Amino acid sequence: MSRKAALISDEISSKAVEIAKLAAELSELEKAEAQREETELGQWLARIYGDGSLTNIEFQQLRDEADRRVDALKQLYPQSTELAAFQEAADIAVQRMQTGILSFKKQKLPSELKTGIHEAYAFQVAYIQACLDRFTQTL
């Protein structure tokens, strides 16, 4: 086999390994998504986002349910001050997100900048979700 053919063969093998890794990763993500949809939270989110929009009533219902669940845990574990602190921090984070996005909205930005703003906030939320997943793996 010529040197060029050997290089192409090696590159194909390398790409095949990369594709296999990506396929396995995709499979794991799909499994995690399916498991998430089976949970009560997944059912809530499917109902809320099922029509492609989030109404003020749905938003308030989700917030009320989140507070109800944390309040129930605080009753079971009154010694855990971290629950109340996290609940308060979540409210502050949402308020900061709202005021931050509203400040951008007032600036009449082009759509590509709006997309970048959405992604920046979405990555922050994804980071929090990843932390939740990581921290609760060992519960």
Image (cartoon, rainbow, N blue to C red):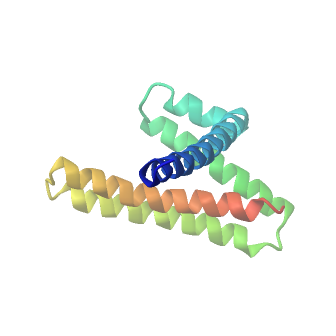
- Given residues 22 and 56, the one toward you in this image is 22
- Residue placed at 37% from the left, 60% from the top? 120
- Given residues 93 and 13, the one toward you in this image is 13
Q: Quadrant of the C terminus?
A: bottom right
Q: Which residue, as the protein is rendered here, is positioned at the far top?
A: 51
- Residue placed at 62% from the left, 43% from the top? 20
Picture coordinates of residue 17, whole percent (x, y): 60, 48
- Given residues 10 and 54, the one toward you in this image is 10
Instruction: Judge from the rendering whether residue 127 lies leftward or rightward of residue 99; answer left or right.
Output: right
Identify the image quadrant of residue 72: bottom right
Identify the image quadrant of residue 106: bottom left
Say if 138 sits above or below 15 in the image.
below
- Residue placed at 64% from the left, 72% from the top? 85
Instruction: Judge from the rendering whether residue 74 lies leftward or rightward of residue 114; answer left or right.
Output: right
Say if 18 sits above or below 136 in the image.
above
- Given residues 9 and 92, the one toward you in this image is 9
Picture coordinates of residue 102, whole percent (x, y): 27, 57
- Residue placed at 74% from the left, 74% from the top? 81
Picture coordinates of residue 117, whole percent (x, y): 30, 57
How many dots with numbers? 0
Q: Which residue, as the protein is rendered here, is positioned at the far front?
A: 1
Say if 45 sits above or below 64 in the image.
above
